Amino acid sequence: MKRIFSLAALLITTATASLGHEVTQGDLQIIHPAIPRPAATAKAAAGYMVIANSGSADDRLLSVETPVAASAMLHLSATSPEGVATMRHVPELVIPAGDVAVLEPGGYHIMLMGLTGALPEGGMIPATLTFEKAGKVQIEFMVDPPGSTDHSKH
């Protein structure tokens, strides 16, 4: 019976690893950085992830760089009470101590502008996140199927 539970745990771990990925540096854990695949001719795309901070002090995401776009910036999407959607650049994102920051559709996200080519589904896109305390963190965005990025379960 113990072997069955061990095998089940191994299968669950393997399945989870194939669906998501993460990078840990210092107190920060970047969980499943992903870009929903944009149209082949798109000039912009959005990147999402969860950033967990297990430390006792806040950190701040200050910038993002990637070779697949002319620029990458932190943005915040919001909808007014009247139903008007807006998106604006934000200079930094606070990652609270002992908490998480979620970058997701309709909220904070990384806007990749001036894409240099198509982003094929299943591809891995290199990027560098620069944090105030953790410094530079190398990640790879996974190009997910369109509309599939739901970080509420990570």
Image (spheres, helix red, strand yellow):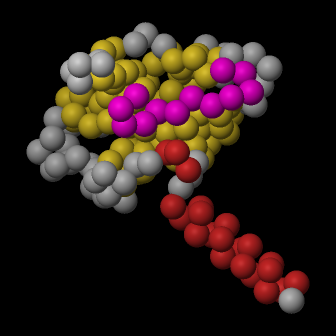
| x 46%, y 19%: residue | 63
**Residue 25 locus on image (x, y percent):** 68, 33
Query: Position of 15 compared to 145: left or right?
Result: right
The image position of residue 26, as x and y in percent, is 73, 30
Furthest residue in direction left, as rendered = 41
In front of the other: 73 or 138? 73
- Look at the picture and state if 25 lies above or below 38: above
Q: Residue at x 43, y 10 (%)?
A: 91
Instruction: Give the residues drawn in magenta, as a range.
Output: 96-107
The correct choice, above or below, for 137 with respect to 118 in the image is: above
Residue lying farthest front?
82
Quadrant of the image occupied by residue 66 = top left
The image position of residue 153, as x and y in percent, is 56, 50
Q: Nearer the viewer, residue 141 or 76?
A: 76
Side of 39 where 137 appears, left or right: right
Q: Is residue 135 visible?
A: no
Residue in the image at 62% along x and 42% along y:
23
Q: Going by the picture, which residue comes out furthest to the top? A: 91
Specify whether residue 69 is in view: yes
Residue at position x 36%, y 44% from top?
35
Q: Residue 37: x and y, percent?
A: 28, 50
Total residue callouts: 0
- Magenta includes 78? no
Q: For residue 100: magenta?
A: yes
- Asked if 10 appears above or below 76 in the picture, the reply is below
